[in-house]
Amino acid sequence: MSKIQKIDRRDFVKLFGLASGGILLGCTATTVEKKFKPAIDQDYFAPNLFVHLEKNGNVTLIASRSEMGQGIRTSLASAIADELEADWQYVSVKQAIGHEKYGNQNTDGSRSVRTKLAPMRRMGAAAKRMLITAAAKKWNVAETACKAENHHIINKNTNEKIFFGDLVEAASQDEVPAEETIQLKKVEDFKFIGKTLKSVDLDDFTHGTATYGIDVRIPNMKFAAIARCPVTFGTVKSFKKDKAAKVAGVEAIYEMPRLIPPTGKFFGMLGGVAVIANNTWAAFQGKLALAIEWDKGENASFDTEAFKKTLTERVHKTGKLVPGSRGNVTTAFNAAEKTVAATYHVPFLVHAPMEVPNATAWFQGDKIEVWAPVQDPQTARSELAHFFEIPIEHIIVNVPFLGGGFGRKSKSDFVVEAVAISKKINAPVQVVWTREDDVQHSFYHATSAQYLKGGLDSSGKVTGWLQRVGFPSIVSSFKPLSDYASGFELGQGFINNPYDLENFRLESVKAEANLRIGWLRSVVHIHSGFGINSFVDELAFAAQKDPVQFRLELIGKDRILTGKSEFPFNSKRFKNVLTATAKMANWGVKPTKNHGFGVAIHYSFYSYVATIVEVSVVDKKVKVENIWTTIDCGLALNKDNIKNQLEGAAIFGMSLALYGKISTKNGAVEQHNFFDYQMTRMKDAPKIHIHIVDAMKEPPTGVGEPGVPVMAPAICNAIFNATGERVRSLPLADLGMV
Amino acid sequence: MKTTLSINGKPYAVQVPKDMPLLWTIRDIVGLTGTKFGCGVSQCGACSVLIDGNLTKSCGIPVAAAVGKEIFTIEGSSENLEFLRQAWNDGNVPQCGYCQSGQLIAATSLLDATANPTDKEIDNVMSANICRCGTYTRIKKAIHKAVALKNETV
């Protein structure tokens, strides 16, 4: 982290559109965030975190991360407010535009709090020191005679107090205090951190006044819909537009070529036929009225059922050995008292955020302005600079609220589409995807097949573990012909298997991509969490041991795996979340008739999660009755927000376990909308019980994603407990169980 | 079709094809964007409005069907909606917030019809609305809370 610095007044307006005056502090958070870093214009130093104090007492945080429901605006503001001793009602958040001055803005990997907490706290503390210095001078007392409390500096001798705002002018003349003199509060003195804070955006959410991407309105803007080939990367052979052109409100129709990204970065756009109209509905109707003949291309024969068979055959044969394997599983299996083997499947999934992909763009010859609900505005900006050959400093990406993201909105294909159309029609335009577009043309969460084999000795101890896995790689979206899972993907729960296994072998099998592959909330952990937790349950059953006790033994002795990580894996914390959940769920009590309990644990995004699920199964139909989840995410910044995230993760995980499946026939996705890509609804929602481990002295770790990977395996293990039947292939709907 | 719509008690003159769904008339023509597009096929409830007090998916009915009737959207205000807003605040319900306009309108319609709904009655009405963030537990709790808030003030 760099030094905290004061931003020159002249730069206030230029950089931020903030009123000049007051104090603006900035610093640079430099953490390892190399993935998909924009390649352009990185060669000058600029602070990337900012806090602004004004004479009226207002404290504004410039939020560099996209808000998509994870509560990041509130969480980051609370850290500054706490150290500053601010009154929460003076605190607000301004959303940053996409610019490299804000550092890496890519909102994924559950890392925002992990990387930003310390610098946020230090800036709040620095600002507080400056206010104290100003007050001490005014009273002519030592700084130690002053303290900050509830937006005032208080003279401890006389109990006089001065409002923050009234000190801003004097404080702004001073230099930022030296780093070593900045003191942070003790954990026990936190006022906002670790407490329950309400979202800073609640009123806008409950009055319909929050502006999401799809709500952006620019004078004289047009609306556009795009017909894309049902088969990935297919192209337009010919099309008839007569009928579409007659739809009232349709103004223009043109063919859009596919934009292919350069190897290694960006997302490009699919291309198709664009219909431009003076309202969204006319654009949708015009699109439906098009008659298009497609050249379906090389993915036209892709059939997910056939691919599942292919992947299954591959995981049943020897694959490529993954580095990090250890011991000798063959010897272990030969010597084992018993061996167990099973094969698991996860289908393709789609994010389906409630707000469909959309973007508003205005191409103005020598500059571009965009308003788009993107998780990664900088990549969007770099991508636009690349495709439209406009200097990056002439491109502005404004980030409104995101109506959900879940990974879909870190791909900026829809932004490229909007700019391409705006350029063509020489007017501002909003591209809106229909729900069908969203379901049928996404960057999908990959399908997977896994084969697991384990050996048990006579005491029921696991002596060997073989796992073969195949899933189309995310890398295929950046580099064609990437037919094996990449190292970073296998690092999500596979190679870093948390169990104490002497003989461990991981193999990777070929899995080519015939759809665009992307990341979805918790990413590859969905596969590793499902495969490993399901299989451990099978091993426990074979060993005739209690599934919780069996896992505790398998995690093994207390140990800390340091490696290169700044967040070392601590087996004690992993066992602790499991024990805590078992206690909360009253584990060990015999389930009532038709009911069953299932457990799953998973370590992801440096957080430890354990979940126990209670299901009932009547006439083969599964109902999830209760979910108990414990998380250890280190310092819990905003407890109620964490609770909300985990409740949401439970529902998200349920949706994918019960219903989630994208299938293709002849290369085309078979699902359309929420009637055939279903979601958990309120009537199906279980009682959810969340426990957050008190680990306030540990650094904060991920929250948005770690609650997801445990859900599907815990549900399936509970079904086994209730019925004796194993579910090894998701979703349950395919088996007629919902 | 040239006509006037009454939304939240205010008249809005519009000129639109009569089969344009009410949703798009409200959003793109009238310019009130609090009512959301989620699916376009009456499956998710994000576009919920009240028409003469009846809960309606505005993506699923033509604008012509709403002429001469009173349309109520999230930009409006009613006694039950205000108690619900308060309860939504107290319970810190929203995550991304996108579906919450529709959730609040559906909950308003529920309380307009049923003063003190049971869990089952809440499920019946609110299951027409999808929340991808999964805030169902909080929504249900907030509806009970709104009833309690209302009872306290009576």
Image: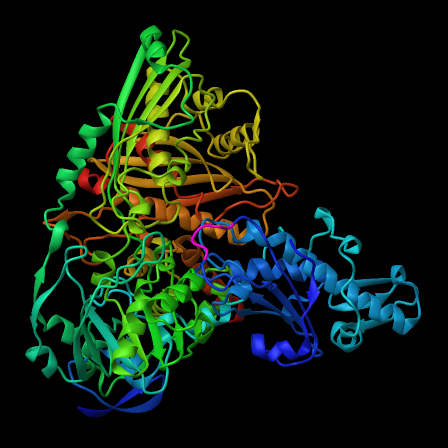
Whether residue A563 appears in this view of the structure is: yes
Q: Position of residue A657 (x, y in %)?
A: 29, 42
Q: Is residue A481 magenta?
A: no
Q: Position of residue A343 (x, y in %)?
A: 25, 27
Q: Nearer the viewer, residue A1 or A303?
A: A1
Q: Nearer the viewer, residue A15 or A718?
A: A15
Quarter of the picture holding the N terminus of chain B:
bottom left
Report the number of numbered marks: 0
Position of residue A681 in the picture relative to residue A636 (left or right): left
Q: In which image quadrant can residue A569 be found?
A: top right
Looking at the image, residue A544 lies above or below residue A483: above
Q: In which image quadrant can residue A430 be found?
A: bottom left
Q: Residue at x 81, y 73 (%)?
A: A162
Q: Position of residue A499 (x, y in %)?
A: 45, 24
Q: Nearer the viewer, residue B132 or B105?
A: B132
For the rendered model, the colour scheme is rainbow
State the extent of the magenta-drawn residues as a range. A33-37
